[in-house]
Amino acid sequence: MKIMVFTHGTIVMHGEGVGVSREERVRQSLERRSSVFGVANYAPAGQAAQLWSWERQGAQLCYLGPSRKPESMAKNEHLLRHLGFPPGPLYHRGPSETYAQVVERAAPDVLIEDDCESIGGEAEMATPHLSAEARARTWTIVVPEFGGIDHLPDDPAQLVGWKASSEGDL
């Protein structure tokens, strides 16, 4: 099973968000505080222990980052390794690509992304923009921005069909 996880806002967050509520993290992002752009000081959103559990159970992990610039891509790659996330390729958008197009190119079985509450919601997400073909082969899970993934099942097989009551109709 191939699992793609969005990075910023889903499994990593700005350092100033550590120790405050999810709502406060969203507010900080909406205010566009400088810490939101300081990738070197980013921290995991929650424990993200599920990623290691999924990897140990044979899931192939990959990540989706927000950057288009090569220097930012390198910083994001370093961030994932520095924070101790399991190995896996980090995908980024090409110059004219959307997130949905990257997801379709990577062809994961499961996509986990956040709801992009602080940056425009559905307009910034992959899930609402996937083609019908991609929707048929990719199970999508949308979590609240900066809420982490700690509440997801430890067993990757349980991800397919899983839906949080707080996800709404995304």
Image (spheres, grey):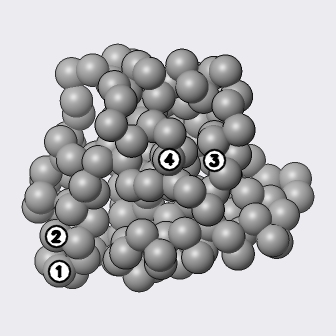
Q: Are marks 2 and 1 in contact (CB under 8 Å)?
A: yes
Q: Are marks 2 and 3 in contact (CB under 8 Å)?
A: no
Residue at disc 3, secondary structure:
helix
Instruction: From the image, state whether disc 3 or disc 1 is nearer to you.
Output: 1
Instruction: From the image, state whether disc 2 or disc 4 is nearer to you.
Output: 4
Q: Which residue is mark 2?
A: 53
Relative to 15, does residue 17 appear above or below in the rendering?
Answer: above
Residue at the right extreme? 95
Q: Which residue is mark 3?
A: 100
**Residue 63's spot in the image, x, y percent?**
50, 65
Q: Which residue is mark 4?
A: 15
Kindly identify the residue that appears in the image at 37 percent across and 75 percent down: 84
Relative to 41, does residue 167 appear above or below in the rendering?
Answer: above
**Between discs 1 and 4, the one toward the N terminus:** 4
- The CA span between labels 2 and 3 is 26 Å
- The CA span between labels 1 and 4 is 28 Å
Image quadrant where one finds the N terminus: bottom left
**Residue 153's spot in the image, x, y percent?**
13, 51
**Residue 112's spot in the image, x, y percent?**
40, 48
Q: Which residue is mark 1?
A: 56
- The CA span between labels 2 and 4 is 25 Å
Kind of residue sitting beneath label 2: Ser
- Mark linked to residue 151: none
Residue 109, quarter of the rendered image? bottom left
Instruction: From the image, state whether disc 2 or disc 3 is nearer to you.
Output: 2
